[in-house]
Amino acid sequence: MKRNVPYLIVTPGIILLLFFMLLPLVNSIWPTFSTEGGISIQSYVDFLTDDYNLKILFRTIKVSVIVTLISAALGIPAAYFIAGVSKKWKSLLMAMTMFPLLTNSVIRSFAWINILGKSGVINSLLLKIGIIDQPLTLLYTEFSIIIGSVYLFLPTMIMTLVGVMENIERETLEAAETLGASPFTAFYKIVLPLCTPGVIVGSILVFTGTMTAYTTPQLLGGNKNMLMATFLYQKASTLGDWTSASVIALIMIVTTLVVNKVLNMAAARLDRREMNHA
């Protein structure tokens, strides 16, 4: 009887997941394979052979990868600094880090519109200084989507890494520096390998979030720089083409799973390499 207790505990959760997550997903995706002649993948062939669709897919992947890399590059040193300060300052810095998450995404996007617009803060400052003669086109570009997405998901990366950084013993770094390693070398050789699991988790969260975000790409990128999430919304809500929307949704899911698998394989390879060097 005791052996069955764990199964009894998780059974309600599994039923809820099946009923509220898996069944609606299958119900949405099944029409993309069902045709009058039986089962077909023609809907996916049509999507993946259309240059316009591929351009949106590749743009989405490119933006998501860039946002993930920038978030990791900024998040690792920021998390390392936060993890090393006193509890008083750590609480304050974590609150400041979480502040963007407490603001509505629409408000955040409109704030960046005021900053990046032709009459925004950046262009007004550059014109006043005399660096440019006419306003730069910063808004409704891939650049504006990347900037807004980094601002949106960088806190997720930092909060994921802080917990990992806290478990790294500072005495290890002090020992490395005592043996002649520079602070940069100690950080590169010790901190980065130890925080790799956190970087992988944070990267997955940032990539997935960027891949599926709607508000920020729509408000900052516009229709000229459409991503998969905005493309899906257009198909479903504007055109009423739910089959095409389901095709886009499944392609986004598969792309995210593939990227997650690649990141996990890279992490496992790094772990094996570190063990071999040890």
Image (tube, rainbow, N blue to C red):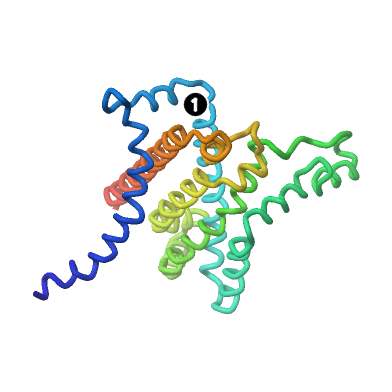
Where, quadrant-wise, is the N terminus in this rendering? bottom left
Residue at position x 55%, y 33% in the image: 239
Q: Nearer the viewer, residue 91 or 170?
A: 91
Q: Amino acid at mark 1?
A: Leu
Q: Nearer the viewer, residue 261 or 246?
A: 246
x, y percent for residue 102: 60, 65
Q: Nearer the viewer, residue 189 or 69?
A: 69
Residue at position x 36%, y 23% in the image: 42
Question: Eyeballing the image, is 107 above or below 170?
Answer: above
Question: Eyeballing the image, is 92 above or below 235?
Answer: below
Q: Is residue 148 left or right of residue 196?
A: right
Identify the residue at the far left of this view.
Answer: 1
Q: Nearer the viewer, residue 82 or 127?
A: 127
Identify the residue at the far bottom of this view.
Answer: 88
Picture mark count: 1
x, y percent for residue 174: 46, 67
x, y percent for residue 278: 29, 53
x, y percent for residue 40: 30, 26
Question: Eyeballing the image, is 57 above or below 99?
Answer: above
Q: Residues within 10 Å of mark 1 (few under 14, many from 20)?
A: some
Residue at position x 26%, y 66% in the image: 12
Residue at position x 50%, y 32% in the image: 57
> Which structural element holds mark 1?
helix
Q: Which residue is mark 1?
A: 54
Question: Eyeballing the image, is 2 above or below 120?
Answer: below
Identify the residue at the far front of this view.
Answer: 36
